[in-house]
Image: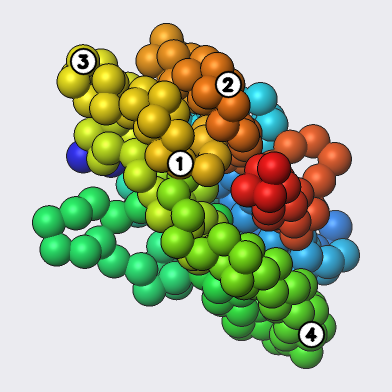
Amino acid sequence: MTRTTTLLAATTAVGLALGLAGCSSGDGTATDGGDGTVAVVTSTNVYGDIASRVGGDLVSVTSIVDDPAADPHSFEPSAHTQLLLSKAALVVENGGGYDDFVDTMLDAVSTDPVVVNAVDVSGKTAAAGEELNEHVWYDFGSMAKVADAIADELATIDPDHAATYTKNAASFGTDIDTLVAGSDAIKAAHGGEGVAITEPVPLYLLENAGLVDKTPEAFSEAIEEETDVPPTVLRETLALFTDHAVSALVYNEQTTGSQTELVLAAAKKSGTPVVPVTETMPEGTDYVSWMTANLDAVSSALAS
């Protein structure tokens, strides 16, 4: 089972819905950011940045999870979250079980905003017998599709500026092409090399760069599910570093614990390069600069 964000109890959601029923009137607030802009709400700041890139000054974007230090998996929505969603014309969520609180809260509001679901737009599905890796924002091609989907929906909501949305999405797509080129360069130089991870967060980026995840699946699954790693699996994971079987450790620094710390210590002791990554954008970055930095860090680690 994929680890999902903690949801409020059903009774709480109903109470919030009743309390906010008067907040979503038919006077235009659901399609207007208050200053003539289109109100957009995104589950995380990753999608907030992409929506801002596509919409520019024509949209007013609010990201529900926007603290770079926060673990999105432990986020608990509030009445304020539902109020934001009740006033949105467009909602952008990740989907795939990652931010289910968005759908739960949308079911409790009287408005009906357009929803762009990144996993659905990506077209990615789980292989037979496996679970879907929902962290699709680490897949550059998927984010180009999301930008196009946002542009299409904004054009429907605000047809007078359709050409602007399309142009902005195309510009973002050009930047995505640059990221793909960086990924291809890593593949050309290091394709087939093994890496280790703590969670599947960066897996799309690594796989697209031709790198092979050597981590026991039971380890990364346990870390993602926040359960104890079986001792035999932990030993197998630590052996990746003592045996020098991987060229780098790429770990999610937003979610750490005693077992991930053991892996991190083993990597450092063995001299294996370590690359920290995050689920949400660090402060002072945008999607493109963030992913460029991730590619640069992976490339540097492999070259060391």
Q: Is residue 74 above or below residue 3?
A: above
Residue at 44% of width from left, 70% of height from top? 122
The image shows residue 184 at horizontal and vertical percentages of: 62, 72
How are the colours assigned in the image?
rainbow
| Viewer-proximal residue among 130 and 60 | 130
Residue at 26% of width from left, 40% of height from top? 217
* Mark with earlier residue (3, 1): 3
Q: Amino acid at mark 1?
A: Val
Is the residue marked by circle 4 packed among few (<14), some (14-19), or many (20+) residues within 10 Å?
some
Q: Amino acid at mark 2?
A: Lys
Residue 280: tell me if it is visible. yes
User: Where, by quadrant of the figure, is residue 274 drawn?
Assistant: top right
User: Where, by quadrant of the figure, is residue 173 drawn?
Assistant: bottom right
The image shows residue 286 at horizontal and vertical percentages of: 78, 52
| Viewer-proximal residue among 190 and 58 | 190
The Cα–Cα distance between marks 3 and 2, rounded to whole angstroms, is 21 Å
> Of tags 1 and 4, which is closer to the observer?
1
The image shows residue 293 at horizontal and vertical percentages of: 75, 49
* Mark with earlier residue (4, 2): 4
Disc 1 is placed on an element classified as loop
Please give the residue where the numbered disc 1 appears in the rendered image: 246
Please give the residue where the numbered disc 4 appears in the rendered image: 167
Q: Tell whether label 1 touches label 3 (CB within 8 Å).
A: no
Q: Is residue 274 left or right of residue 239?
A: right
Q: Amino acid at mark 3?
A: Pro
Please give the residue where the numbered disc 3 appears in the rendered image: 231
The image shows residue 94 at horizontal and vertical percentages of: 47, 54
Disc 3 is placed on an element classified as helix
The Cα–Cα distance between marks 4 and 2, rounded to whole angstroms, is 46 Å
